Image (tube, grey):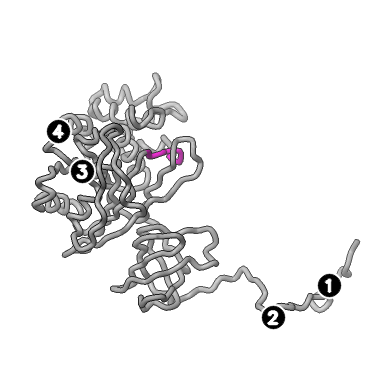
């Protein structure tokens, strides 16, 4: 049944009065040209701590952003009270496009990905050489996430006074990943922090590692003025340490423009969000050899063209082995 005629204009359409007296809803979002630029340092139950120029400002996400969430490392635009004084609150009205994203899922069957940190240049994968024992599969998974998210990996091996790093170095040497080996004594006297800092200067580096490997202790040595609680004891039965970092936190390196992002200790690193076909991009010496691969090749199949490419001497066979090990990591449990 037609309510209006064929030639209806706006004067013919009845509108209900707004009894509440508030403004009607609109899809037009404010532009906030005068918004200040800032960086998210940490997130805690909907409150975001941001750095705006040289001030630390508490903020919340504006309703107009909808479900889009800001994470540590995000470059954001803020309006409202930007004084940083106690009990003030600003609003985040824009989130800038991210240059890199480190993501993970709870496990390989979890469809919901979690963004750990945005805009980081580097992922420092911290592993103990003993107490607890190294977990190569977890390292592999972190490497896949780094390559997929646009971060350069850095391997940091701790507790070299308890075990030799040779085995791990042999396992990852063909990936050409920069690494630093530290001991407990070197952490205490500052030598280890100095060597690690050489890899961090001028960059934003996210630190990730299994509980108990000394990740937060290392961050404390790098940023002593912003000390965080260190890991408690390592369980003698499970080899696991207590979680003492409960949320990601960005901390400035003293004396330069670098940043470290301390993240909670992980027990698993799910890769449900990773498309295996993108892992090959982390191997530029092998990527040209995929031109002869069949469609949708998983690069671990009998007719994969990479076998012939390597046999012809275009790349080191160890590199192909490393690629296939990383591709297969989603099919293996991290403790294998």
The answer to whether residue 127 is left or right of residue 288 is: left
Instruction: Give x and y (percent) for residue 33.
Output: 45, 76
**Circle 2 residues within 10 Å: few <14, some 14–19, many ≥20:** few
If the image is split into quadrants, where does the C terminus sit? top left
Going from N to C along the chain, the mark reached first, 1 or 3, is 1
Residue corresponding to mark 2: 21
Tell me the residue that label 1 is attached to. 8
Give the quarter of the image for residue 255.
Answer: bottom left
Q: Which residue is mark 4?
A: 163
Q: Which residues are magenta?
A: 268-274
Crowd rating for badge 4 (residues with CA inside 10 Å; few <14, some 14–19, many 20+): some
Q: 89 or 68, which is in the foreground?
A: 89
Secondary structure mainly formed by the magenta segment? loop
In front: mark 1 or mark 3? Answer: 3
Q: Residue placed at 18% from the left, 33% from the top?
A: 169
Point out the tag, 4 or 1, that comes first from the N-terminus.
Answer: 1
Q: CA distance from mark 3 to mark 4?
A: 14 Å
User: In front of the other: label 4 or label 1?
Assistant: 4
Q: Quadrant of residue 292?
A: top left
* Residue in the foreground of this view, choosing between 302 and 235: 235
Residue 313 drawn in magenta = no
> Which element type, helix, strand or loop, lies under badge 1?
loop
Separation of disc 2 and disc 3 at Cα?
A: 61 Å
Vertical arrangement, residue 20 with respect to residue 315, above or below:
below
Q: Is residue 65 above or below residue 172?
A: below
The residue that disc 3 covers is 156
- The location of residue 3, given as percent across then percent down, is 88, 67
Which image quarter holds the N terminus? Answer: bottom right
Q: Is residue 100 above or below residue 148?
A: below
């Amino acid at each position: 049944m037609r309510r209006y005629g064929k030639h209806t204009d706006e004067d013919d359409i009845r509108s209900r009065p707004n009894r509440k007296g508030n403004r009607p809803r609109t899809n037009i979002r404010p532009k906030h040209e005068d918004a200040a630029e800032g960086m998210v340092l940490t997130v805690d139950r909907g409150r975001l701590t941001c750095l705006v120029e040289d001030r630390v400002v508490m903020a919340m996400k504006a309703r107009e952003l909808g479900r889009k969430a800001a994470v540590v490392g995000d470059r954001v635009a803020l309006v409202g009270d930007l004084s940083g004084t106690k009990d003030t609150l600003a609003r985040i009205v824009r989130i800038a496009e991210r240059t890199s994203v480190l993501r993970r899922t709870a496990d390989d069957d979890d469809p919901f990905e979690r963004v750990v940190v945005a805009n980081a240049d580097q992922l420092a994968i911290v592993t103990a050489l003993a107490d607890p024992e190294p977990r190569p599969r977890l390292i592999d998974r972190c490497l896949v996430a780094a390559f997929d998210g646009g971060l350069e990996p850095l391997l940091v091996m701790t507790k070299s006074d308890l075990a030799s790093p040779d085995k791990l170095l042999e396992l990852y040497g063909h990936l050409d990943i920069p690494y630093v080996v530290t001991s407990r004594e070197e952490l205490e006297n500052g030598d280890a922090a100095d060597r690690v800092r050489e890899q961090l200067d001028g960059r934003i580096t996210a630190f990730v590692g299994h509980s108990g490997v000394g990740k937060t202790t290392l961050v404390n040595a790098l940023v002593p003025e912003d000390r965080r609680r260190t890991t408690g004891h390592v369980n003698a039965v499970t080899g696991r340490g207590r979680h003492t970092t409960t949320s990601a936190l960005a901390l400035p390196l003293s004396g330069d423009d670098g940043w470290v992002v301390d993240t909670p200790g992980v027990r698993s690193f799910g890769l449900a969000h990773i498309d295996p076909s993108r892992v090959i991009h982390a191997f530029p010496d092998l990527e040209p050899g995929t031109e002869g691969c069949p469609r949708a090749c998983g690069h671990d199949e009998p007719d994969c063209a990479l076998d012939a490419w390597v046999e012809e001497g275009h790349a080191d066979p160890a590199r192909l082995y490393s690629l296939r090990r990383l591709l297969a990591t989603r099919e293996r449990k991290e403790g294998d």
